[in-house]
Amino acid sequence: MVEAASTATVVVREYDSARDRGGVEAVERACEVGSSGGGKMCLFTDLLGDPLCRIRHSPAFLMLVAETATGPNSTEIAGLVRGCVKTVVSGTTHAKDPIYTKVGYVLGLRVSPRHRRKGVGKKLVDRMEEWFRQTGAEYAYMATEQDNEASVRLFTGRCGYAKFRTPSVLVHPVFGHALRPSRRAAIVWLEPREAELLYRWHFAGVEFFPADIDAVLSNDLSLGTFLAVPAGARLEGVEAFLAAPPPSWAVLSVWNCMDAFRLEVRGAPRLMRAAAGATRLVDRAAPWLGIPSIPNLFAPFGLYFLYGLGGAGADAPRLARALCRHAHNMARDGGCGVVATEVSACEPVRAGVPHWARLGAEDLWCIKRLADGYSAGSLGDWTKAPAGHSIFIDPREF
């Protein structure tokens, strides 16, 4: 898979771990350092020596690099991009049956600062879209932060993508002390088979719900699925629950991102570091006080991602909060710095998700139709479909 640029000095090809790993890591470092110029803080990602960690658990994946010559017998990596293809729910029929669509997801686009504004990014995206088409994908989509103007301009201005959805990343620090379990909720662990039944029932019509949810739930990085119901409610198996669910309930699963990558906040002022350290000292000295403390985010830390967050009923947000507290304690025991989730603006249980606004982000998802034509059918052109109340975030590519 090779594409020559118009100047014949750049080729786009598939990533080769034996020859490209060092060059890829150099580009990743250069992009992180470049984003923190001017004394601003940035979030550095350590992929733990595995550039494929964010896509290798997907059904089909590919990583491309853009290589440029630096001399008669030498080259360097100028940019890279990752992508994966999967089948997800794109809508429902008039009978409320799910419509499944094959999509390609573009992520991890990086261009070395010294090679920007030369068309490298677009070449990488174009080549990735070509692979998407070869695998039968009908749509391509990407995600970025809403204030990432350069990325938004590239995809919407030059690559033909349309702004599509605006979910929010909600992040909560992991305190030094454990959070008290809710007395008004009963939390039950579900086996992967039970979780699959519940998810296919509840998320059947939710956008981006993966057809291979069974593979997600049985992955070693998935630490469990938990169902919360009002205290005192009787649970006699998932089949009975689906036949007669309680008036209110909530569910979520926990994904261990810590074993895939680590994060680190760089460029923080010394005073901020000292203040955060002081909160941890107080928390360790008097954990019974339950004083919120800021974990050490200025050194490599891990996170647990909460996916499959949903529920129903008037008390669903309260039950979701109980689940988040349970996940917080799991993350504390696992040595993580934060727990995070991503939800749509209208997600019914969003109000129950505890988070610190300054740690989160507002995302923008953009989408593009890859097929040359489409049938009106039950869905029509997905790029023009209105947003639903919920959206499913696949933890494999978070």
Image (cartoon, grey):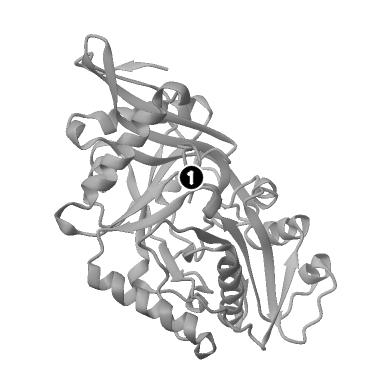
Q: Amino acid at mark 1?
A: Gly
Circle count: 1
Residue 117, quarter of the rendered image: top left
Residue at 50% in and 90% down: 289
Seen as rendered, the residue at the extreme right is 236
Whether 110 is drawn above or below 90: the answer is above
Residue at 40% in and 25% down: 20
Q: Secondary structure at mark 1?
A: loop
Residue 125, quarter of the rendered image: top left
Residue at 54% in and 43% down: 377
Residue 291, quarter of the rendered image: bottom left
Q: Which residue is mark 1?
A: 380
Expressed as whole percent of the image width and height from the top left, the position of residue 33 reads 24, 47
Expressed as whole percent of the image width and height from the top left, the position of residue 280 reads 42, 77
Seen as rendered, the residue at the extreme left is 38
Q: Nearer the viewer, residue 205 or 118?
A: 118
Whether 312 is drawn above or below 39: the answer is below
Question: Which quadrant of the rendered structure holds the N terminus?
Answer: top left
Residue 90 seen:
no
Seen as rendered, the residue at the extreme top is 72
Q: Is disc 1 surrounded by few (<14), some (14 to 19) or many (20+) residues within 10 Å? A: few
Expressed as whole percent of the image width and height from the top left, the position of residue 376 reads 49, 42
Position of residue 266 in the picture relative to residue 82 (left or right): left
Position of residue 16 in the picture relative to residue 307 (left or right): left
Residue 99 seen:
yes
Expressed as whole percent of the image width and height from the top left, the position of residue 134 reads 50, 24
Q: Nearer the viewer, residue 215 or 262?
A: 262
Position of residue 315 in the picture relative to residue 299 (left or right): right
